Image (cartoon, rainbow, N blue to C red):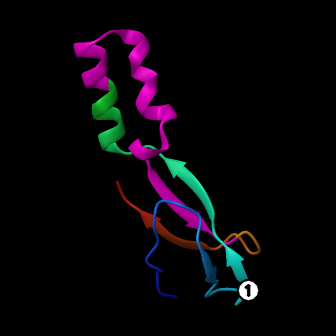
């Protein structure tokens, strides 16, 4: 199965696993860059700012899944 090129938002596509026409389900996941940004915010500003990169979707990867069969479709990397 090939991985589909995806963007940061849910997108309409045909699932290669179940062949259903769906709008992808997006789950955000932290990356090394997210952790580095949190550490920099802690060092430069103050400790309450550490949670900001974990709360903002634009600091995390967007993993796309099929809502019908839950097959992995691809990742948009930040």
Percent position (x, y) of residue 76? 42, 63
Check disc 1 and report the residue beneath it: 20
Residue 48 image-quadrant placement: top left
Nearer the observer, 50 or 12: 12
Q: Main secondary structure of the magenta part?
A: helix
Q: Residue furthest right?
A: 68
Which residue is rendered at x = 40% and y = 17% of the image? 49
Which residue is rendered at x = 31% and y = 16% of the image? 42
Establish if 56 lies above or below 67: above
Percent position (x, y) of residue 26? 59, 59
Establish if 30 lies above or below 52: below
Percent position (x, y) of residue 10? 59, 64
Q: Residue furthest top?
A: 46
Q: Is residue 66 left or right of residue 44?
A: right
Which residue is rendered at x = 71% and y = 77% of the image? 22
- Residue 44: in magenta span: yes
| Mark 1 Cα-neighbour bin, 10 Å: few <14, some 14–19, many ≥20 | some
- Residue 76: in magenta span: no
Residue 77 image-quadrant placement: bottom left
Nearer the observer, 45 or 16: 45
Which residue is rendered at x = 46% and y = 80% of the image? 3
Establish if 59 lies above or below 9: above
Percent position (x, y) of residue 69? 74, 75
Q: Is residue 24 left or right of residue 34?
A: right
What's drawn in magenta, residue-wise?
39-66
Kindly state the secondary structure of the residue where label 1 is placed.
loop
């Amino acid at each position: 199965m090939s991985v589909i090129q995806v963007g940061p938002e849910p997108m309409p596509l045909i699932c290669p696993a179940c062949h259903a026409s769906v709008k992808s389900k997006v789950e955000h996941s932290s990356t090394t860059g997210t952790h580095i940004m949190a550490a920099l915010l802690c060092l430069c500003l103050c400790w309450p700012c550490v949670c900001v990169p974990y709360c903002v979707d634009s600091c995390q990867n967007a993993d796309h899944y099929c809502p019908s069969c839950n097959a992995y479709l691809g990742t948009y990397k930040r």
